Amino acid sequence: MPEPLSFSTRRTEIAGVSVLSLAEQFGTPLYVYDAEKIRTRLRDLSIFPVVRYAQKACSNLAILRLIRDAGAVVDAVSGMEIERAVAAGWPVSAEPGAVAPIVYTADIFDRYTLDLVTGKYPVHVNCGSIDMIHQYGSRVQNREITLRINPGFGHGHSRKTNTGGPGAKHGIWHEQLDEALAAAAQYRLRVTGLHLHIGSGTDMEHLSKVVDAMDALARKVGSAVTSISAGGGLPVPYRPGEEFVDLEAYAALWKNKIDQLSALFGHPISFEIEPGRYPVAESGYLLCEIRAVKRQGENLFYLVDAGFNNLIRPSMYGSYHPISIVHRAPSSEQGEREVIVGGPLCESGDIFTQAEGGYVEKRTLPAASVGDYLVLENAGAYGMVMGSNYNTRPLCAEVLIDGGRARLIRARQRFEQVVENEER
């Protein structure tokens, strides 16, 4: 199990490269990723037989190629994520009996994606609704599918990240499994796998419940099952004192269960885990510049040039991100301050230091001035991928540091690109 993290509010470099040099060369706001950190976390996960990366967490092509080169396969949740995976180098299909390189997992088919998976890119499909089975089976038959099941319970660091239970839209309700199997049989679709994902930031207690739920579901489906996916949800520490889940203990739980089911069914069952946050969260940093220091009554604000158009997690979920300060020059300011960190958007909710429900919080940070830099850390998962052009602000640049060298992997969006599809 990785060591618990410690966070500092002062920083001078990222992955061995000076923050000041990154800001000078690439500008701000800027996403910076540490390639070696991604490789390290993927090595952590190598105790599982198959690692299927949930690319929705961070899907820059350079990041995807790095993850592909490390031996992971990939999950896609949209038609264009399928195309993104192909562009990153994963093959569309595998040899019979081999692990599918790309799996499409969703609760619906939009028309574009249904055309894609039944035509140009016939990737493996993981159905999260019975309507998906009917729509897919009306186009193609004699194919294998897997079923994403909602086991009736879930978990999440926020109510908005809980993907199980009756309040979640995801998966086929566990009590409708027989109906799903009948729908598949109607079109001669072979249900060969099951998938469970209950939400993010789960602990060992909830992960153990997933194992037990999957065991019951697999026994109900029977010996047709040849693959099982545990989904993702592995927690990543964001606050001091938080710890990683014991991956070895979790892997042992699954190995014991998979061995039992393999013996019961009389054939091997492949097993995979589907992390998104775990490989990339710690690798990412959002570098921004302090553009105003202002007092509002008893509150002191650091206002930076990045907003929730760059990192929406605090505004959407009340998510906590470690924050550090980088002084542009030796500072005349001394000590620390209780501050609120906000962005440039014309929205009161554009605050990086807030709890779920929009409650603004203060953070103890070093004294800083206009022109100093602020780094939002552990921002590699669900950061850039949720970016927008709100307030007509461009998508920021992305940089990957590998072997001490920083290279641009996404150029900053220009105004012409922001409006290129609009009528003039």
Image: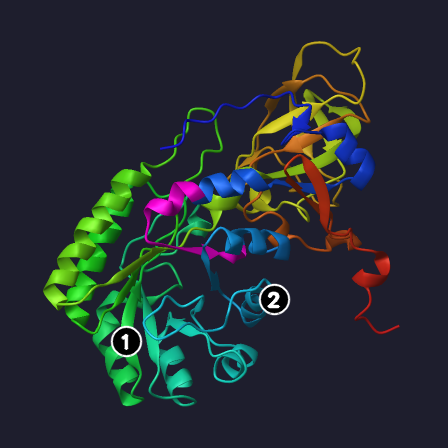
Whether the magenta-drawn stretch holds residue 54 is answered as yes
Earlier sequence position, callout 1 versus callout 2: 2
Identified at 39% across, 45% down, the residue is 45
Q: From which residue to which does the magenta span run? A: 43-56
* As drawn, 150 above or below 285: below
Whether the magenta-drawn stretch holds residue 171 is answered as no
Q: Does residue 391 appear in this view? A: yes
Q: Tell me the quarter of the picture where residue 194 sits.
A: bottom left
In the rendering, at what x and y percent does residue 105 appear? 43, 67
Residue 87 badge = 2
Element on which disc 1 rests: strand
**Going by the image, does 386 lie left or right of 151?**
right
How many marks are shown on the rendered structure? Answer: 2
In the rendering, at what x and y percent does residue 231 appear? 36, 56
* As drawn, 327 above or below 406: above
Measure the C-alpha gap from mark 1 to mark 2: 28 Å
What residue did someone put label 1 on?
191
Q: Does residue 234 appear in this view? A: no
Q: How has the structure been colored for display?
A: rainbow
Identify the residue at the far right of this view.
424
Looking at the rendered image, the quarter that the N terminus falls into is top left
| Camera-nearest label, 1 or 2 | 2
Identified at 44% across, 66% down, the residue is 101
- Crowding at label 2, few (<14), some or many (≥20) Cα neighbours within 10 Å? few
Residue 306 badge = none
Identified at 80% across, 10% down, the residue is 332
**Going by the image, does 237 lie left or right of 253?**
right
Q: Nearer the viewer, residue 409 or 388?
A: 409
Looking at the rendered image, the quarter that the C terminus falls into is bottom right
